[in-house]
Amino acid sequence: MDAHRGRRGGPRTANRPSLTLCITARDAEPRLRILLAEAEHYADEVVVAVDRASVDGTWEVATQGADRVFAFTHDGATGAARLAGLERASCDWVLFLDDDEGMDAVFPQLRDDLLSMAGVTHWWLPPPPTSTASAS
């Protein structure tokens, strides 16, 4: 099952690299709503892979807010769903996120510089460190 909306993606310019956000989601209705709203600030296209085992409104949220949505059956690994998302992506760059991840608020301002660096073919953006300090 696939859905295609094409709501983003005005004219792309040669001087600005385009970015597809691919999201893998399961039972993520509230989280996905937030992630899609954040993506408005940096993604040119959003592709969402919805696990067929989802029992909440994840599919509906995805079809309302993403450009392309498809269902997949989770087999214990995310590789197949990510590859299927990659096949549906149409931009210069692809960012993969799970439904419980997100980008730092400064990413929209850094995006074009990061994606325009000569000779760079990929980025790995580690999660922020977690605090191990305890309250006394």
Image (spheres, grey):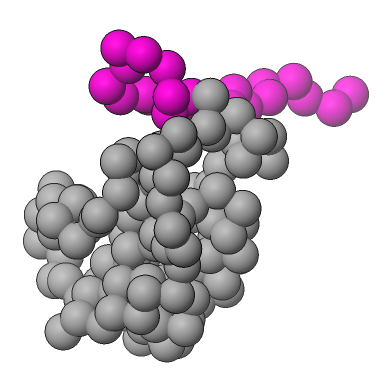
Q: Main secondary structure of the magenta part?
A: loop
86 to the left or right of 33? left
x and y, in percent, of residue 44 in the image: 45, 55
In the rendered view, would you say 116 is above or below 44?
above
Is any part of residue 94 visible from this angle? yes
Q: Which quadrant of the structure image shows residue 39?
A: bottom right
101 to the left or right of 81? right
In magenta, the rendered stretch is 114-136
**Residue ID at (37%, 24%):** 123
**Residue ID at (53%, 24%):** 113
The reply to whether the magenta stretch includes residue 12 is no
Q: Residue furthest top?
A: 119
**Residue ID at (60%, 36%):** 107
x and y, in percent, of residue 7 in the image: 44, 75
Q: Which quadrant of the structure image shows residue 120?
A: top left
In the rendered view, would you say 124 is above or below 90?
above
